[in-house]
Amino acid sequence: MNIEILRCDITTIEADAIVNAANSSLLGGGGVDGAIHRAGGPEILEECRKIVARQGGCKTGEAVLTTAGRLPARYVIHTVGPVWNGGQRNEHSLLANCYRNSLQLALDAGCQTVAFPNISTGVYRFPAAEAARVAVATIRAFLQAHEGAMKVLLVCFDEVNFDCTKEELERGH
């Protein structure tokens, strides 16, 4: 399976696309979203504003594609993860949609490599182990359905997410 795990800053990754854990306004924020907007420069925000003007933001579970600006990637795929509410409000399937829709956008754009952060595990409080389970299962299913389509990098910023993601990846071998 073409999945690799890294522990670093996603804004330094050379890939065809990096995924941004955005908010629905697409106008930047904290965490990985703020870091991507700062590192990528004003071109990303400019394209996000055009998307907002056209479709009114991005709903939870959906994804949109923009330039990567000054980042060492070609594209940024912005996806809006669910806020954790105890797991009773469709959070798991919404999170799976984030990965599925981002992968489909990457495939449609001809990307060979796509890098994901840990979506929703920061201020949205999705439990890291459950988020890793959803991420790995969804990515594996997508890659099986689109064999050889791309390489997926799971980029973890902190040790907790790295350990949970690594454990989930090893479980499937």
Image (cartoon, rainbow, N blue to C red):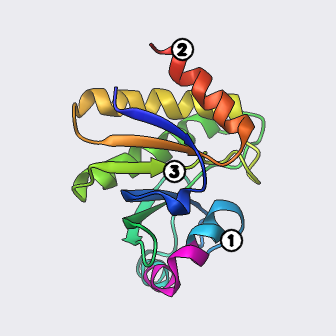
Taking the spot 34% from the left edge, 33% from the top edge, the residue there is: 142
Image: 10 above or below 163: below
Indicate which disc, 3 or 1, sits on the residue closer to the N terminus.
1
What residue would you read off at disc 1? 29
Asked whether 46 or 84 is in front, the reply is 46
Visible residue check, residue 26: no
Residue 1 image position (x, y, % from top left): 34, 25
The residue shown at (38%, 50%) is: 114
Tag 2: Cα neighbours inside 10 Å, few (<14), some, or many (≥20)? few
- The residue stretch that appears in magenta: 37-47
Residue type at mark 2 is Arg
Q: Is residue 121 left or right of residue 59?
A: right
Query: What type is the residue that disc 1 sits on?
Result: Gly
Query: What residue is shown at x 42% (from left), y 67% (from top)?
Result: 72
Look at the numbered discs 1 and 2 and tell me whether their residues touch, using CB distance below 8 Å.
no
Does residue 151 sit above or below 115 in this rendering?
above
Query: Which image quarter: residue 39?
Result: bottom right
Q: Which residue is mark 2?
A: 171
Image quadrant in which the C terminus is located: top left
- Horizontal side of residue 128 vs 73, given as left or right: right
Number of residues whose C-alpha sits closer than 10 Å to that of mark 3, classed few (under 14), some (14–19) or many (20 or more): many
